[in-house]
Image (spheres, helix red, strand yellow):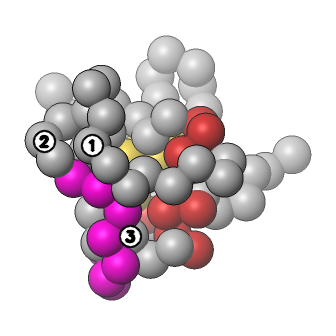
Amino acid sequence: MTRPPPCCITRDCLHFTGMEDDLTTGGLRYTCRAFPNGIPVDIAYGDRQHEVPLPEQEGDYVLTPGPCDLEKSGPATLRES
């Protein structure tokens, strides 16, 4: 079963950076500037819109309409650490 695209894409968030392989789970995770290690499921797939900065995020990025970089959300690639 494949998941639908995350809300970050359908909401056209400027800060969405794509998807990458999650070596911990063997699946994929979606990333953005606020959550470079993976967008929380309730934001990515739920009704929770990221309208205010959260304590667990990086910087003060929030949902900002604009073109996301969909080139990065193509086939997952491993991120060098």
Q: Position of residue 60 (x, y in %)?
A: 16, 47
Residues in magenta?
61-69
Where, by quadrant of the figure, is residue 42 drawn?
top right
Q: Residue at x 67, y 48 (%)?
A: 46
For mark 3, give the secondary structure: loop
Give the Cα distance between marks 1 and 3.
14 Å
Q: Residue at x 32, y 49 (%)?
A: 52
For mark 1, give the secondary structure: loop
Mark 1 or 2: the one toward you: 1
Residue wearing tag 2: 59
Labelled disc at residue 53: 1
Mark 1 or 3: the one toward you: 1
Give the Cα distance between marks 3 and 2.
16 Å
Residue wearing tag 3: 13
Q: Position of residue 11 (x, y in %)?
A: 51, 73
Q: Residue furthest right?
A: 1
On screen, residue 44 above or below 35? below
Q: Viewer-proximal residue, 47 or 75?
A: 47
Q: Is residue 57 left or right of residue 63?
A: left
Give the Cα distance between marks 1 and 2.
8 Å
Amino acid type assigned to the residue bearing label 2 in the image:
Gly
Q: Position of residue 14 (x, y in %)?
A: 29, 72
Q: Is residue 8 left or right of residue 79?
A: right
Q: Position of residue 19 (x, y in %)?
A: 44, 51
On screen, residue 31 above or below 72? above
